[in-house]
């Protein structure tokens, strides 16, 4: 039986750091990159007798995330103690939210990549707040713990089992990260552990009403690992079912080197977290006017920007989707347009090809890798006015990436300006017509196809800098005369 007889059911649990300066329950820095145990105090080290004080900004960012994902914001939610025992959790419990989370319901809408396609909505179960644990480091035969991350604010974003493929899981994560970055709730830096994902996977026969038994793959820290782990796990489960076996409800770890999942623990030995309300924190009350204020101050979301790009600028759904994958990219495009560009799609394609290429090649953020957006805009403006060709713009752009110089200066320095002067072009045409008398006679005798040859000769005579439009006009006139 082919794999097509089965359908994958996937739900994701995403943990992401909130961009606060200090930790969730103490004043220590939540920043990344300090030396081991530099950002610690008795509270985040779990010393006896200390009391947690809730970081208001973290709550506001979590509400912002909830509103951006169309969740209901609970007027009252509760912090709980989730007990488990690892060296990186000094209190022996994590402060989290269990029965009454801050945000409920909601959805993430995946960008449609083709015209008229129905956008897919992945429903959310909840978004709750919690603190991060520290980090165990095993090296040179020793086990060490760094508590800098202990107490850093997180939200956990739990999806309903609405995702149906590895690709769709990737699209969901990209959109979620894009939203979190647009609203400045999280920078979504996976390489710093700022966004991590647990993946729940089951399969069922297509058309079956019930879900199959799921496995959970823990702590994936790259989109590619998520996609690969899902593909591997779906295939593994189908193989077991096809061989007449049963899926065990297990927690797995992804081995990125061998590209397989391996069991970590079965649910029989599942942690018993013994949740109970955190006695040191009062219920979290969110007054309606705070929610309103956060709603009012909400920046434009990627989905809204996408819709605007299609509606107002005439971009395709695909172009709009690519440009809003990253907040900086969308902003770059809009700043380019501010140079007064009329051809929005040329600008969009410029960003999607030229700009994204240098960003990918440099493997550095947009702001470091590409020229200022306003300079890119000026450069394309020169193309629109006919001062330079699109090819010359690409040459100039490559130089600008290295030199950091502006568009006008670069075009002048490299001598890329097109010649639009009619006198100079007419002279070049005359010269070619005189030199190619035989071909001119053939052309005048009806071999229209030769026109391209004459254009080529004129361009060659002008060192490639003739304005093609003007060359065409003058040549046509002279050849027909
Ligand atoms: P658990 O009690 O094992 O933690 P939850 O019901 O809390 O399970 O769900 C955790 C995640 O697993 C959610 O993202 C949910 O959408 C997803 N999920 C639940 N059931 C399934 C299933 N049968 N197949 C795939 N994912 C599932
Ligand atoms: Mg769960
Ligand atoms: Zn602290």
Image: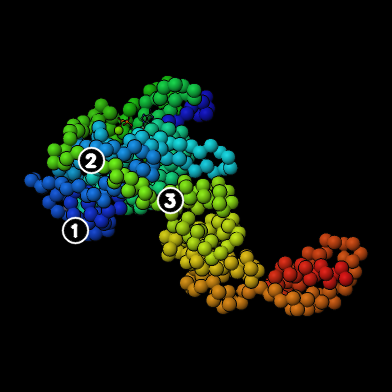
- CA–CA distance between discs 1 and 3? 37 Å
- CA–CA distance between discs 2 and 3? 27 Å
Could you tell which of marks 2 and 1 lies nearer the N-terminus?
A: 1
For label 3, count other residues whose C-alpha is less than 10 Å away and answer few (under 14), some (14-19) or many (20+).
few
- Nearer mark to the viewer, of 2 and 1: 2
Left or right of 442 in this view: 141? left
Left or right of 43 in this view: 394? right
- Nearer mark to the viewer, of 1 and 3: 3
Badge number at residue 368? none
Q: Measuring 26% from the left and 42% from the top, which residue is drawn there?
A: 287
Residue extending furthest toward the right: 445
Left or right of 51 in this view: 351? right
- Say whether residue 111 is visible: yes
Residue nearest the observer in this picture, 248 or 314: 314
- CA–CA distance between discs 2 and 1? 33 Å
| Residue 196 occupies quadrant | top left
Residue nearest the observer in this picture, 127 or 46: 127
Mark 3 residue element: loop
Q: What x and y, as percent, mark residue 384?
A: 62, 65
Which residue is under mark 3?
Answer: 300
Mark 2 residue element: strand
| Residue 227 occupies quadrant | top left
Could you tell which of marks 2 and 3 lies nearer the N-terminus?
A: 2
Q: Measuring 19% from the left and 33% from the top, which residue is drawn there?
A: 275
Report whether the residue tagged 2 is closer than 8 Å to ligand 3: no
Residue extending furthest toward the left: 49
Which residue is under mark 2?
Answer: 285
Q: What x and y, as percent, mark residue 125?
A: 35, 34
Q: Measuring 62% from the left and 67% from the top, which residue is drawn there?
A: 383
Asked if the residues shown at circle 2 and circle 3 are in contact, with their CB atoms under 8 angstroms apart, the answer is no
Badge number at residue 38? 1
Mark 1 residue element: loop
């Amino acid at each position: 039986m082919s794999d097509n007889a089965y359908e994958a059911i996937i739900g994701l649990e995403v943990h992401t750091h909130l961009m606060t300066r200090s930790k969730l329950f103490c004043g220590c820095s939540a920043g990344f990159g300090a030396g081991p145990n530099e950002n610690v105090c008795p509270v985040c080290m779990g010393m006896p007798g200390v009391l947690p004080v809730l970081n208001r900004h973290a709550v506001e960012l979590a509400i912002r995330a909830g509103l951006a994902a169309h969740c209901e914001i609970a007027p009252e939610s509760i912090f709980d103690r989730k007990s488990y025992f690892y060296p990186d959790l000094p209190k022996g419990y994590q402060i989290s939210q269990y029965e009454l989370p801050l945000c409920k319901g909601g959805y993430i809408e995946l960008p449609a990549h083709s015209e008229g396609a129905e956008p897919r909505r992945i429903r959310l179960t909840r978004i709750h707040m919690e603190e991060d644990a520290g980090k165990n480091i095993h090296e040179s035969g020793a086990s060490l713990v760094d508590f800098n991350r202990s107490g850093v604010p997180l939200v956990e974003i739990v999806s309903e089992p609405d995702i149906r493929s590895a690709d769709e899981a990737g699209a969901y994560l990209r959109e979620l990260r894009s939203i979190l970055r647009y609203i400045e709730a999280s920078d979504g830096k996976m390489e710093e552990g700022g966004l991590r994902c647990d993946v729940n996977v089951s399969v069922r026969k297509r058309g079956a009403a019930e879900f199959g038994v799921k496995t959970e793959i823990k702590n994936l820290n790259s989109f590619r690992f998520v996609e690969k782990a899902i593909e591997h796990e779906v295939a593994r489960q189908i193989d077991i079912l096809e061989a007449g076996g049963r899926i065990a409800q297990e927690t797995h770890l992804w081995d990125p080197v061998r590209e397989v999942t391996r069991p970590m623990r079965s649910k029989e030995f599942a942690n018993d977290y013994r949740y109970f309300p955190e006695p040191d924190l009062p219920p979290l009350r969110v007054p309606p006017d705070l929610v309103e204020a956060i709603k009012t101050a909400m920046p434009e979301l990627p989905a809204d920007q996408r819709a605007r790009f299609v509606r107002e600028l005439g971009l395709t759904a695909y172009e709009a989707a690519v440009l809003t994958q990253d907040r900086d990219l969308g902003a770059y495009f809009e700043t380019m347009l501010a140079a007064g560009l009329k051809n929005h799609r040329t600008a969009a394609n410029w960003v999607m090809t030229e700009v994204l290429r240098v960003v990918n090649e440099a493997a550095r953020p947009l702001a470091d890798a590409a020229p200022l957006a306003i300079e890119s805009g000026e450069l394309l403006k020169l193309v629109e006015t006919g001062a330079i060709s699109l090819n010359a713009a690409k040459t100039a752009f490559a130089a600008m990436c290295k030199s950091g110089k502006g568009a006008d200066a670069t075009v002048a320095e490299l001598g890329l300006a097109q010649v639009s002067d009619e006198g100079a072009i007419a002279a070049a045409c005359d010269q070619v017509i005189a030199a190619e008398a035989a071909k001119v006679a053939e052309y005048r005798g009806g071999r229209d196809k030769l026109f391209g040859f004459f254009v080529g000769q004129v361009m060659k005579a002008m060192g490639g800098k003739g304005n093609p439009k003007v060359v065409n006009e003058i040549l046509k006139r002279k050849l027909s005369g």
